[in-house]
Image: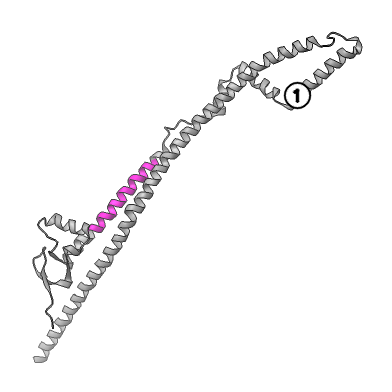
Amino acid sequence: MAEEKTAICIVDHQVHMAYDGSFLSNLETGTRNLIKADYPKAKVTDFICDHHLLKYQLTRVDGMINSDMKQTKKINRRLTKAMQSDDYDIVDVNDSLKKSLTFGQRVSDAVARFGGSWGFIFIFIFVLVAWMIVNALSLFGVHFDPYPFILLNLALSCIAAIQAPIIMMSQNRAADRDRMNSENDYHVNLKSEHELRILHAKLDNLTQNELPHNLEIQKLQIQILGQIRNELDDLQANQELQNTSKSDHQTRE
């Protein structure tokens, strides 16, 4: 029967069976670094028993969990702060314009509103047709603007000359409204972009750190359970050996 290989643990300097521990070269980098932090002169060819390795593996698991929790809390604080921030100046356009309206601006808005309606078109056509019929046919003895209706042309020119700047004033009001809406959209987009960047950071942390760490923790848990199982088997074997020795001693007596 081949002789089973033994090794000396770098922690307790006791001789152990090779299957009761691991060489540093076979350990994960994180666990190996924890051991080297306590034993700077340790080499990859050195051996550590399962009993002492268990402590470093648990420390490694705790370190990864605490690191993930700290990073997650940091990102969550940033996201909460961004969502609760009032630094973004959102203006109620309608309320702001309503409070700043002057009498002239109200008149210009009313004129533009009426001048751009079907009611104005129908009334205007009716007045033109009635004017021309009354003056062309001398109805009711009225004949104040004979053909070619020079007075009508003058009246239309005057109305157009007055109506044009009034409508432009109303258009300026509309331009102010559009500008304020654009500023609101800019602030909303800026806040949304900031929140999206934080969410991307949280997603990146999840995919690049937490998921790999979870897989590594599961692997360490399986190793730890195997080591605990081996130690329980050794304890059970020692207990059975002690019971057998006691039985043999009693038999001899």
Q: Residue furthest front?
A: 148
Residue 235 locus on image (x, y percent): 18, 75
Quadrant where the N terminus sits is bottom left
User: In which image quadrant can residue 5 be found?
Assistant: bottom left
Residue 38 locus on image (x, y percent): 13, 56
Quadrant where the C terminus sits is bottom left
Residue 66 position (above or below residue 158): below
- Side of 137 relative to 237 (left or right): right
> Residue at position x 31%, y 51% from top?
69
Q: Which residue is mark 1?
A: 121
Residue 101 locus on image (x, y percent): 58, 20
Element under disc 1: helix
- Side of 73 relative to 140 (left or right): left
Identify which residue, 161 or 28, lies in the foreground.
Answer: 161
Identify which residue, 180 or 221, lies in the foreground.
Answer: 180
> Residue at position x 40%, y 46% from top?
199
- Side of 159 relative to 22 (left or right): right
Kind of residue indicated by mark 1: Ile
The question of residue 193 being in magenta is answered with: no
Question: Magenta segment range?
Answer: 59-80
